[in-house]
Image (tube, rainbow, N blue to C red):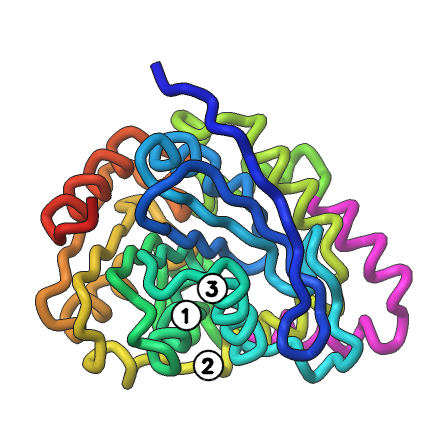
Amino acid sequence: MLSEIPKKTGTFQSYDGTTIYYEERGAGRPIVLCYGLACLINHWTHQIRYFSQNYRVIVFDYRGHHNSGVPADQSELSVDALVKDMRALLNHLDIQQASFWGHSYGVQLLLRYYDLYPETVKNLVFINGFATNPIRGMFGQVMGPEAITKVFRAFQEGYKLAPQPLTALWRAAVLNPISIPLAALAGGFNLSLTSIKDIEVYARGVASLDIEIFMKLFEEMMDYDGTAVLEQIKVPTLIVSGTKDGVTPASHQYAMQKKIKGSELLRVPYGSHCTQLDLPEFVNLRVEKFLAQNLYN
């Protein structure tokens, strides 16, 4: 039976004055968890509970997300801005080196983070991630990358003309009860494994996000290419892939594993895009083994 580890919360001012919110639990070697685009801390709930028993687990909200602030200069909504926030978080907490874990878009951010600050990274865990534009292969053959891009661009243009109606439509669509089974059908979740409560919390979090911020960061995600960083990685790396992930299929994780020397690939049977929510015990035990093997205990 896992004990309940008290949560400490805090904020700090990042490099440009934007307020960044964070939480930490436990003591010992630090682990920093980075969620996906438009996600929230809840995506790591099982890992936080498990690993805070023996480690210092740190989670935070990206700028423009939830409890963190929105930058005064909208151009400071970028991959590099989020990465600078992560570095500022380590400085604020007086951490010299940590284990960094990313889910989905969080993996892109960690590639850029490693590119800039490799000396602060002890090891890496990539879950359902990608190095470059993930819309290639997204949702299988239902929609090609060009179609997804066109839909996104059309939404951008529509927002410029009618921001309020489009915002209302966005929130209604996300919160619509049918959105959960549709997300599962697309490979975002495995409804047989993931708690409906966790998915509902996620949906409310997405709906609360400013749509302009989402669009800006989604464009950043499509434009960033961290492929060149993969061959530079010199620290132990575990790559986790879900066999039922239709959002960022296994081809993304295979590509990363081939380029990161000595990296390990874990294929999770029945895992969706959120394997850490689908099968947390399986994922946690495997990550714990990875940490032990790499003298991180």
The kind of residue on which mark 1 rests is: Gln
Which residue does the image show at 20% across and 50% down from the upper left? Answer: 296
**Viewed as shown, does residue 172 lie left or right of 198?**
right
Position of residue 216 measured from the top left corner of the image (x, y, whole percent): 66, 74
Q: Secondary structure at mark 2?
A: loop
Determine the CA span between mark 3 and mark 1: 19 Å
Question: Which of pointers 3 and 2 indicates the residue nearer the eye?
Answer: 3
**Which numbered disc covers residue 202?**
none
Asked whether 52 or 189 is in front, the reply is: 52
The kind of residue on which mark 2 rests is: Tyr
Residue where numbered disc 1 is placed: 108
- Is residue 1 depicted above or below 100 in this figure? above
Position of residue 70 measured from the top left corner of the image (x, y, whole percent): 75, 67
Q: Which residue, as the protein is rendered here, is positioned at the far front?
A: 94
The kind of residue on which mark 3 rests is: Leu
Q: Earlier in the sequence, mark 3 or mark 2?
A: 3
Position of residue 118 measured from the top left corner of the image (x, y, whole percent): 30, 76
- Is residue 3 depicted above or below 123 in this figure? above
Q: Earlier in the sequence, mark 1 or mark 2?
A: 1
Q: Earlier in the sequence, mark 3 or mark 1?
A: 3
Q: Secondary structure at mark 3?
A: helix
Which residue does the image show at 84% across and 77% down from the upper left? Answer: 160
The residue range painted magenta reads: 149-174
Asked whether 196 or 60 is in front, the reply is: 60
Which residue does the image show at 26% across and 51% down from the upper left? Answer: 240
Determine the CA span between mark 1 and mark 2: 8 Å
Position of residue 164 measured from the top left corner of the image (x, y, whole percent): 90, 62
* Residue 279 can be seen in this image: no
Main SS category, magenta section: helix
